[in-house]
Amino acid sequence: MAFGTDSKVFVATLEYQLEGGSLDLASDAVKIALYNDSCTPDEEVALANTAYGAGVWASNEVNDGAEWPAAGQALGSVTSTITTNVWSLDAADEVSDGTSATLADVRGCLIYDDTVSDYGLCFLDFNGAQAVTDGTFTVQFGAAIMTLTV
């Protein structure tokens, strides 16, 4: 499955955390990196292959120097909350660092923990090619980046 089909949480990251992992989403640096449709994300890969720069995340990144740098941008206002039986991770919508970004064929992104081994938390599908030419690129999150119901 290439981008254009689904958004998923990485199973191995959940297992890592449930078995005593050290992710602290309240204080860790969480980043977003953009990718084209040449990578084939899989939510069931080994933990090491969820990481930024590993597995399918080792190539096909889309960036624009200082406007949207390689390795992505840090998410702002990250929150990790539980309401009743639903845990959610959210952040402010992410906007390119300048107003002259040029990005083409952006199909999705990797959300990852830049503090702990660059482990991937999830990947998000943008439902088709997104682009900007000499402008501002914004990733708008819905009610939450990801939710888990227990």
Image: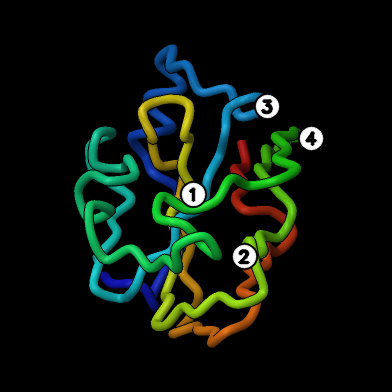
Which residue is pictured at 42% across the width and 68% down the height? 6
**Which tag, 1 or 2, sits closer to the chain's start?**
2
Q: Which mark is residue 96?
A: 2
Mark 1 belongs to which amino acid? Ile
Image quarter of the C terminus? top right
Circle 1 residues within 10 Å: few <14, some 14–19, many ≥20: many
Mark 2 belongs to which amino acid? Ser
| Residue holding disc 4 | 84
Q: Position of residue 42 (x, y in %)?
A: 28, 55
User: Residues at badges 4 and 3 in contact (C-beta under 8 Å)?
Assistant: no
- For label 3, the SS is loop
Q: Position of residue 147 (x, y in %)?
A: 62, 47
In three-dimensional space, the C-alpha distance between marks 4 and 3, rounded to whole angstroms, equals 19 Å
Front-lying residue, 96 or 4: 96
Q: Which mark is residue 111?
A: 1
Circle 2 residues within 10 Å: few <14, some 14–19, many ≥20: many
In three-dimensional space, the C-alpha distance between marks 1 and 4, rounded to whole angstroms, equals 25 Å
In three-dimensional space, the C-alpha distance between marks 2 and 3, rounded to whole angstroms, equals 23 Å
In three-dimensional space, the C-alpha distance between marks 1 and 2, rounded to whole angstroms, equals 15 Å
Q: Position of residue 11 (x, y in %)?
A: 37, 40
Mark 4 belongs to which amino acid? Thr
| Residue holding disc 3 | 26
> Is residue 8 among the parts visible in the rendering?
no
In three-dimensional space, the C-alpha distance between marks 3 and 1, rounded to whole angstroms, equals 15 Å
**Which tag, 4 or 3, sits closer to the chain's start?**
3
Mark 3 belongs to which amino acid? Ala
Q: Position of residue 80 (x, y in %)?
A: 70, 34
Circle 3 residues within 10 Å: few <14, some 14–19, many ≥20: few
- For label 2, the SS is loop
Front-lying residue, 20 or 114: 114
